Amino acid sequence: MRRPRHASSTRSARRVLAGLAVTAVLVFLPAGAPGHVAAVVGPVQSWVTDGDVLAVASAGGSTYVGGDFTLIGRATGSWAEVDGAGSVQPIRAAVNGSVTDAEPDGRGGWFLLGDLSSVAGAEVPEGQVVHLGPTGRLDTRWKVRSDGEVYAIARVAGRLYLGGSFSRLGGERRNGLAAVDARSGAVLDWRPRVAGRTKDDLEEVLAIAPTADGRIVYVGGDFGRVNGTLRRSLAAIDSGGRLLPFDPGASFTDEDEETATVSVLALDPRGGTVYAAGYFGVLGGQERTGLGAVDVRTGRARRWNPDCDGDVSAIVVGPSGSIVYVAGEFASLGGKSRRGLAAVDARLGTATLWDPGVAGSVQTIALDAPRHVVYAGGSFESVGELDRTNLAAVDTRTGTATPWDVPVVGEVAVVARGRGGAVVVGGDVVSIGAARRTGLAALTADASAVADWRPPLRGIVRSLAPDPSRGRVYVGGRFSVGETRTQRSLAIVDLGSGTTAPWGPVVNSGVWAIAPSGDGETSTSVARSRP
């Protein structure tokens, strides 16, 4: 079992690739590229891919892009709203950086956490929580800043709880846990004292789960005491800041083991159970390996013991309380083979027949029970037999991915239900709603969209040489062409239809450059022995 990482520590490889002036200025960036995302209006058009762009050419007003990628899309930044049809809504305030957690403000806006560099072009100071208003624009009047990391937020009515590894928040002394007014950002007089196991240990609050009425706040993390009383990584505090008797104690059977951590919490809507996940071997007095459930009154472990063989990143309890959805990076859960996402019986702890089969890890989930959908985000390639890149909607009845398909360049850390059936998406991402293209793509003449141009090439494209007079482009790289076994790494593609023509010698290596003759009858290519 691995110690869960903090989402804010995730980083992507970051490189700027190329710029090109055609009908607009096009800036191509791979996943996680640095700097601000340009506005998606005006003369600058920003595009990103999930790999390298190795060739760019223009012909007939369109732009053709080749490289080693499978996705290409508009640069949306790391936060966007997607409607029920899968269309990304207009970006009012581009968020740049990594969004690790989010909470609705109750008025149509959102509070955002993460390693954010800028919002709407304005730099975000380190340790600041961001508020976006109901129009999606940055609320410049709402400013809450800590002297450390904020890992978790949760709102009840007009109170916003924040947990992390800080000693001051909004200029007030607070140790790892605080509450602010959701409207003004003013720090409230709620002062639970969270401390490490020894005087030299730092405290970290990683998860917050308040009850619906706000009377009790459950907190999990890496700490040893609350208000001077022993509490091992899991505690309950009332709305006045007083510690409650609830004491499950997350630990290990061997006292010499690493200290335990609780990083995920969820409450049974009926109010009787707290579900917890993290890095521990004992919970509520019983052996529980990284995942368990405890009684809210006694703190004792429930019978529920799914025995997960990996990491759990999210837990969501169904509205009836009978089904618990668990997401993470695992291959077995509840006594059955389950990858990344599973539904578990709340009483028995056994996996149900629901089995999406995610190829990768799931970091976040959101349940839309009326529409029978679980939205999942993370770092994955498919759900069942269907291609789904880092974001998917799964039918709660069948376990299959729905037609809703919104590919994302980057790892998704936040998925939540928005207004009117919309879904909000955030993470360490740069493009939400990208198009699937393998190594070769075309942008429309106005550079506003990816054209429906899909040559049957599979692999890496390194060279493009257009021949507009004949309506074709010469393509070189390291790829296969359709089902033709003898035609590889060289192709002629029709600029209009995307079909390929039989052409070229048999090539047993990668082609790095192509130069067609002036009359278009011959061409010269340069090949290399490696791809």
Image: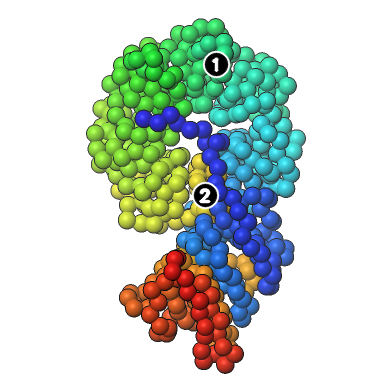
Of 58 and 355, nearer the camera is: 58
Residue found at x 64% / y 46%: 96
Mark 1 residue type: Asp
Residue found at x 42% / y 27%: 278
Q: Quadrant of residue 75?
A: bottom right
Q: Is residue 492 left or right of residue 318?
A: right
| Residue 103 at x, y percent in the picture | 57, 35
Q: Earlier in the sequence, mark 2 or mark 1?
A: 1
Residue found at the very far front of the displayed protein: 529
> In the rendered image, is residue 417 in sight?
no
Of 71 and 419, nearer the camera is: 71
| Residue 283 at x, y percent in the picture | 36, 18
Report how far apart the C-alphas of labels 2 and 1 lie in the structure: 34 Å
Classify 10 Å Cα crowding around label 2: few (below 14), some (14-19), many (20 and above).
Answer: many
Mark 2 residue type: Gly
Check the image and report above or below for 115 versus 72: above
Assess whether mark 1 and mark 2 are in contact (beta carbons under 8 angstroms): no
Q: Which residue is mark 2?
A: 410
Q: Which residue is mark 1?
A: 201
| Residue 403 at x, y percent in the picture | 40, 57
Of 4 and 382, nearer the camera is: 4
Question: Dividing the image into 4 quarters, which one contains the N terminus?
Answer: top left
